[in-house]
Image (cartoon, helix red, strand yellow):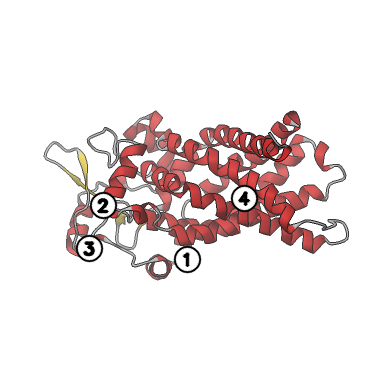
Amino acid sequence: MSDAVVSFMKDFLAGGIAAAISKTAVAPIERVKLLLQRKCPAVHRDCSYGLVRNAKGHVRRHWGDSFTHSSVQHASKQITAEMQYKGIIDCVVRIPKEQGFVSFWRGNLANVIRYFPTQALNFAFKDKYKKIFLGGVDQKTQFWRYFAGNLASGGAAGATSLCFVYPLDFARTRLAADIGKGPAEREFTGLGNCIAKIFKTDGLKGLYLGFNVSVQGIIIYRAAYFGCFDTAKGMLPDPKNTHIIISWMIAQTVTAAAGLVSYPFDTVRRRMMMQSGRKGADIMYKGTIDCWRKILKDEGSRAFFKGAWSNVIRGMGGAFVLVLYDEIKKFSY
C-alpha cells in the first residue's frame, strides 16, 4: 500500500472518530437548534408537517395531503400553546417531558453515520486540496496567498464531501425535527424508513432538496472553518506542539464565527429540506430564491438566525473536532 493511501486512510479515520465522539456529545443542542430553526411564525405553523389530534387526543400528522390556506390555519388552531417552543430553555425543558430524555439524541445515529464520512472526507480532501492551492506558497512572505489557499482548500473539501453524504444529512434533519413521542405519532420510524418514504414520493431529487444552497453555505462555512484555523495555527511559533487549550480557544473562535456567517444559508436549506413529501398547496417555497425572499418578507432578517445561539453552543463540538483530530494525528504519525 502506497504512502499516499496510508496517509489518506489515517486522515479519514482520525477525522471520523473525532467527529463521531463530538457529535454524540452535542446531539441534544443540535436537536434544539433544528427544532427552533424550522418554525414559521408568519403563518403560525410548523415548517415540517401539519399536526392534528385524533379522537383519543394523540397527535398525528398529515402526510402527503394538500392543505388549503384555511385548512392550515385550522390545523394550527388544534396545536396547543405548549407545543410552540418559546426559546432554547423552553425547548430543553420540554423535550424530555413530552418526548422522553432519549429523544434528545433522535436522529443522532443518522448524524453519526453521516458525519463520520463527512468529516473524514472533509479532512482528507482538505489536505489534498491544500497541496493544489498551497503548493510552493511561503506562509511567512506570502500571507494573503497562504490565507486564500486555506480558504479555497477548506471550501472545496466541504463541497466535495457534501455531494456524497447529502441524503444522510437530509434524513438526519427530518428525523431530528420529528416531535412525535411514540411510533404512531412520528412521521418516520427510522433512517431507512425516512429515506425510503421520501424517495417513494419525490424520487432522488427529493433527497437532494436544498442541495444548491447547501453547497453555497458549506463553502462559506468550511472556508472559514478550515482556512482561519489553519492560518491562525500556522502563525504560531511551534504549530505542531501547540498546547491543547490554545488549540481549543482558536478552534472555538473560528467555529463560532464560521457558524454565524453561514447560518442564514443553513436556515434556508433546512426549510427546503422540510418540503420534501409535500404536494400542491402545502408547498411553501417554489425554490431557494423564493425561500430567501419569503423568509425575509414574512418573518424579517432575524428569522435567518433562529437557533443561532444554540448553534454557537453546539459549535463547541466542532471546535473539539478540530483539536481532537490534531491530537489523534500526533499518535498516528
User: Judging from the image, what secondary structure is the residue with disc 2 in?
Assistant: helix
Query: How far is the residue under mark 4 from the one under mark 1?
Result: 19 Å
Query: How far is the residue under mark 3 from the one under mark 4?
Result: 39 Å
User: Judging from the image, what secondary structure is the residue with disc 4 in?
Assistant: helix
Q: Which mark is residue 256?
A: 4
Point out residue 242 in the picture as x, y percentages from the top left corner.
Answer: 80, 38
Kindly identify the amino acid type of the residue bearing the numbered disc 2.
Thr
Query: How far is the residue under mark 3 from the one under mark 2?
Result: 13 Å
Point out residue 105 in the picture as x, y percentages from the top left corner.
Answer: 43, 34
Mark 2 near mark 4, Cβ–Cβ under 8 Å?
no
Mark 3 near mark 2, Cβ–Cβ under 8 Å?
no
Q: Is residue 161 above or below residue 70?
A: above
Kindly identify the amino acid type of the residue bearing the numbered disc 3.
Gly
User: Which residue is under mark 3?
Assistant: 280
N-term mark: 2 or 4: 2
Q: Which mark is residue 301?
A: 1
Q: Residues within 10 Å of mark 3 (few under 14, many from 20)?
A: few
